[in-house]
Image: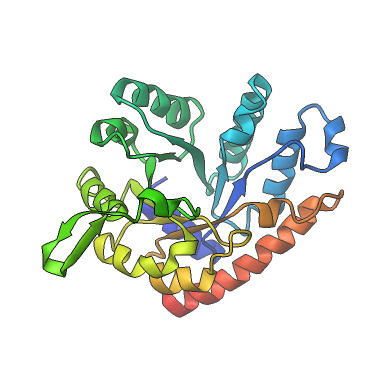
Amino acid sequence: MTREELFSTITKKKSFLCVGLDTDITKIPSHLLKTEDPVFEFNKQIIDATHDLCVSYKPNMAFYETQGAKGWISLEKTINYINQKYKDVFSIADAKRGDIGNTSKMYAKAFLETLNFDSITVAPYMGEDSVTPFLEYKNKWVILLALTSNKGAFDFQTKEIGSLVEKGRGIKLFEKIIETSKKWSTPDNMMYVVGATKAEMLIDIRKMIPDNFLLVPGVGAQGGSLHDVAKYGMNKQCGLLVNSSRGIIYASAAEDFADAARQEALKLQKEMEILLQKYL
């Protein structure tokens, strides 16, 4: 999917919502456990109920890998279902891969070719040659971890590692990651993860990368503010994919779970529609 196609979907749906498919078999409604593939059945009903309210789905690999081969089958069925039935949806493999070049090539092939996701989250710790294999696929995206939403982000990501003489202050690790990595590619196939719980830092981040899309987790259960994210992070093409996982997919544990998920997604979509009108 190209950047223009993504922006077109955002405009059409009046939404920049990403629904995280963090599907835990121990939390899905019990009546689904009688089906042939409970995880896929859960995902399918969530997707059918919310596809017109969101622009993206983000399966988190850990929730599928924990099921072994069965989990990979559920994952493959899920991405195939999205690609075949909802072609305007942007798919994210939340895999957080990061390794040396040859291994990265195999990870890239697995997620961007074999499974045919539109994008994959990548950890930049091992540097340029560990990231570039993911950038070789046309109309596919790398979503680079920059400033995450968890408490532990302050352990390393915000530590000063050098100086910015022109600004009279130190440069933080996440800033160094952004400044260095933006030379590897363009806003047409590179996004960054910036947590909603760090919304105030979006001011400086947007000065560094004004045109890139940002994947923003942390809204909802983690306490991030959607309004602050839009205020500080939106650009002329929206430039945001705001993720909500548990708050949507686990809105109900009963047979009405898909309807309940839709209602939660609708609340966010309505807020996003107002914010798009305000800031775009």
Residue found at x 46% / y 68%? 229
Residue found at x 26% / y 66%? 207
* Quadrant in the picture for the C terminus: bottom left
| Residue extending farthest bottom | 278
Question: Which x, y percent locates residue 205?
Answer: 31, 63
Q: Is residue 26 left or right of residue 179?
A: right
Q: Is residue 188 left or right of residue 32?
A: left
Quadrant hosting residue 235: bottom left
* Quadrant in the picture for the N terminus: top left
Q: Name the residue nearer the viewer: 70 or 277.
A: 70
Q: Is residue 177 left or right of residue 191?
A: left
Residue 147 shows up from this direction: no
Coloration of the structure image: rainbow
Residue found at x 79% / y 56%? 259
Q: Is residue 150 left or right of residue 125?
A: right
62 up-or-down from 47: above or below: above
Q: Name the residue nearer the viewer: 216 or 111.
A: 216
Residue found at x 35% / y 26%? 104
178 up-or-down from 211: above or below: above
Question: Which x, y percent locates residue 165?
Answer: 11, 64
Give the number of callouts: 0
Q: Name the residue nearer the viewer: 100 or 277.
A: 100
Residue 238 shows up from this direction: yes
Question: Which x, y percent locates residue 65?
Answer: 60, 28
Question: Which x, y percent locates residue 127?
Answer: 26, 36
Q: Name the residue nearer the viewer: 267 or 121.
A: 121
